[in-house]
Structure formats: C-alpha cells, structure tokens
Amino acid sequence: MKKLSLSKFLEEYKEVIRQHVIEQFRPLYTPVDRKGFAEKLSTLKRRPFAAQVDAIAGLTLALKRQPAAIMVGEMGVGKTLIACATVYLLGVKNTLILCPPHLVQKWEKEIRDTLPQCEVIHIRSITGLCKSYESPSSKPRFFILSRERAKLS
C-alpha cells in the first residue's frame, strides 16, 4: 500500500477529484449565462458590474429553488445593490430589511438610487410594520426596520 501525504494525494488525483466534484455538484449559474441576466437588469437605475451580475444571478436562481441563500462579501462589494437587484429579479412585492441602526438611511438611499418604481417605508416598530403592510400597494415595497427598534418594540 502506497503512503501519500495529503498534498501529494491531491496533486496526484486532482483531475479525478475535480471531475467527480463537477459531476456531483452542478452549479446553478455560470458566467456564460451572464448576458441574459445583464439584459434583465438593464432597467435598473444603476448598472451592476459583471461580478455583481454573477452574484445577483446566482442568488436569484438559488432562491427560486430553495427558501434561503447566503451572500457573503467584504465592505464595498455592493451587497446592498446585489440584494436589491435580486429582489427585483424575483418579483418580490414586499421585502423586510432588518439592519443595524446606522445602515437604515444607507439602505433607503441605495434602494431609491437602484430600483425604479418602488416604495421605501422606514418602520419604527413592529406595530408600524403591521399597519404599513396591510395597506395595499401596486409597487414593490421595502420595509426598513432597525434591529434595535425590532428588539425594543
């Protein structure tokens, strides 16, 4: 029996492992599909960069198949834009954003700067959320609630 270190094992069998991973874990999205998503996003007020389109497309496809997805990115990547555009592509009518208090105005500004024809409602309590949600609207709505307000109300 041949003894191999992990690094030598990976080096020796990398092609077999790669092929197995590709067969078993087919991606929902690849950048080859970017053009179609970029066209759908052309009606946004701000145009996402190619890497952001990739993230938007991946999240959109994931959320069509399952109830949750996780997006991770460093500061400045455009997580807010990616989230707004994903909701836009999914056609969601009501979105609740629960965020730290210092980001409430940032979310509000970025939504207004990104999405055409939407309502942004700054919620100050859970009761306020219920009242605002019950009133009908033809436009997509974003309810922004500070996590501190949510905890304390």
Image: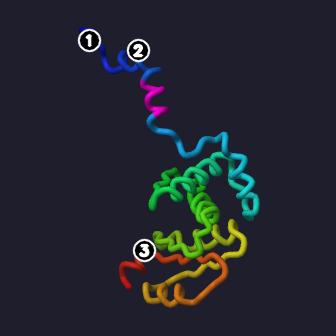
Amino acid type, label 1: Lys
Dot 3 lies on which element?
A: helix
Of 79 and 84, which appears nearest the observer? 84
**Magenta segment:** 17-23
Looking at the image, is 56 positioned above or below residue 111? above
Looking at the image, is 117 positioned above or below residue 70? below
Quarter of the image holding residue 33?
Answer: top right
Rendered location of residue 107, percent (x, y): 58, 69
Q: Is residue 18 covered in magenta? A: yes
The dominant secondary structure in magenta is helix
What residue is shown at x 53% (from left), y 88% (from top)? 134
Rendered location of residue 57, percent (x, y): 61, 52
Colouring mode (rainbow / by chain / secondary structure / one colour): rainbow
Q: Indicate left or right for 98 with 49 as reference.
A: left
Which quadrant would the N terminus be assigned to in this image?
top left
Of 94 and 84, which appears nearest the observer? 94
Amino acid type, label 2: Glu
Q: Residues within 10 Å of mark 3 (few under 14, many from 20)?
A: some
Q: Residue furthest top?
A: 1
Amino acid type, label 3: Arg
The residue where tag 1 is placed is: 3
Mark 1 vs mark 3, foreground winner is 1
Q: Indicate left or right for 37 with 97 as reference.
A: right
Q: Which badge, 3 or 2, is on the more N-terminal residue?
A: 2
The number of numbered badges drawn on the structure is 3
